[in-house]
Image (spheres, rainbow, N blue to C red):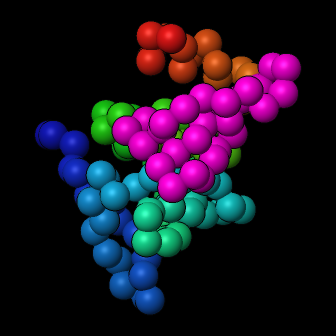
Amino acid sequence: MAALDRLPVRVNGEIKLLPVADVLYCYADGNRTVVVTPGGELSSHAGLRRMAERLEPWGFFRCHRAYLVNLGYVRSVVPWTRNAYSLVLDGKREVPLSKHRVAALRRVLGW
């Protein structure tokens, strides 16, 4: 079965099917995952690990233990500390890139 290009998220008690292309990044917040879009934040009950498995075929990358980013929106990789970086997305949003994930991102991007 092909991967569905929609992501179920809760909005005012309803389950909405959000186009995966609209998702900038996701982050863990307790026992839920917050899905960030240009229009705001939405909640999902799926854990970040499950979300990563579902979204990786659509160009998402687990950049940190608590973050999953849509590589299609990443505009630059900026040094944050000696061993860590931040990923700058459209709209000047930033997400952390764990020092443990730098090598994997280098392979994915060919940098």
Horizontal side of residue 59 vs 32, given as left or right: left
Asked whether residue 63 is in view, the answer is: no
Asked whether residue 88 is in view, the answer is: yes
Q: Nearer the viewer, residue 107 or 34?
A: 107
Read off the magenta span.
Answer: 71-97
Q: Is 40 colored magenta in this rendering?
A: no
Horizontal side of residue 104 vs 73, given as left or right: right
Q: Nearer the viewer, residue 53 or 41?
A: 41
Give the image location of residue 85, x and y in percent. 71, 29
Q: Is 93 colored magenta in this rendering?
A: yes
Q: Is residue 108 above or below residue 79?
A: above
The quarter of the displayed image where residue 108 is located: top left
Tell me how many marks there are: 0
Give the image location of residue 42, x and y in percent. 49, 71
**Residue placed at 44% from the left, 18% from the top?**
109
Q: Is residue 19 above or below residue 101?
A: below
Q: Is residue 85 above or below residue 14?
A: above
Horizontal side of residue 71 vs 58, given as left or right: right
**Residue placed at 27% from the left, 60% from the top?**
19
Give the image location of residue 53, x and y in percent. 42, 38
